[in-house]
Image (cartoon, helix red, strand yellow):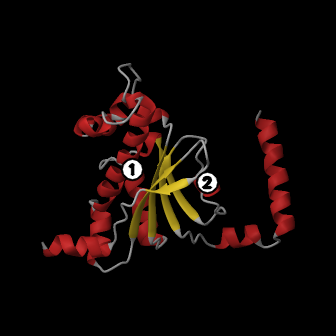
Amino acid sequence: MLNDLLERNIAWSEARNNDDRGYFARLAAQQRPEFFWIGCSDSRVPANVVAGLDPGEVFVHRNVANVVHSSDMNLLSALEFAVEALKVREIIICGHYGCGGVKAATEDLPHGLADHWLEPIRRLARAYAVDLAQEPDEEARRDRLSELNVVEGVRRVCETPIMQRAWRRGVDIRLHGLIYGLKDGRLRDLDCTVGPGHFQREVAE
């Protein structure tokens, strides 16, 4: 399996170099992504592939069920690097329908350490229990919960000191919530975009 992977890498790098002789030299020289992507670790949702972007165009952090924990130093370090060092100005929190992490969070079964990681999703499920009950079946309820998890992720990133400081300095950074459909390969905007204007209104209030 490893040999196969290495052979695929050779074929890919040679094809890429044949198409664009300066491609790898440009990538090696400097990293200039336009987007910071917080997504799920699910192997079916690779950020640059589903967004139609090349390597180097998106800086990525992924975890199980794209959960934003306020104490996740890995995510916070990546966020700070994206904002302060890479000067990324578009941040995307992206979940997906059919998420195994969301499914695990709604099951009355033991999942080891994942149960601790997924606690924010269980809290969301309790908070929106009445709304979720309006969905026609379990799959629809889980998909709606996946959407709510993205919206909550946008809110939590907005509340980090990293974002608050950047907005206070007048940096024009916007956060967007997207959901990806495994069944059709489409990204959908959840209409929860937040920018510096929203922060300024909150401060004024």
**On the image, numbered disc 2 is attached to which residue?**
50
Secondary structure found at label 1:
helix
Location of residue 16 in the rendering, given as x and y in whole percent from the top left corner = 81, 62
Check the image and report above or below for 7 versus 177. above
Quarter where residue 23 is shown: bottom right
Disc 1 + disc 2, Cβ < 8 Å: no
Residue at image position (24%, 36%) is 130
Tag shown at residue 150: 1
Q: How crowded is mark 2: few (under 14 residues within 10 Å), some or many (20 or more)?
A: some
Amino acid carrying mark 1 in the image: Val
Whichever of callouts 1 and 2 sits on the residue coming sooner in the sequence is 2
User: Where does the C terminus fall, quadrant-wise?
Assistant: bottom left
**Up-down: is 141 above or below 185?**
above
Which mark is drawn over residue 95? none
In the shown orientation, is residue 114 left or right of residue 122?
right
* Farthest residue, direction left: 205
The residue nearer to you, when weighing 179 against 159, is 179
Across and down, in percent, residue 12 comes to 80, 54
The percent position of residue 170, horizontal first and vertical second, equals 31, 80
Question: Image height check: is 109 above or below 176?
Answer: above
Disc 2 marks which amino acid? Val
Q: Distance between the residues labelled 1 and 2?
A: 17 Å
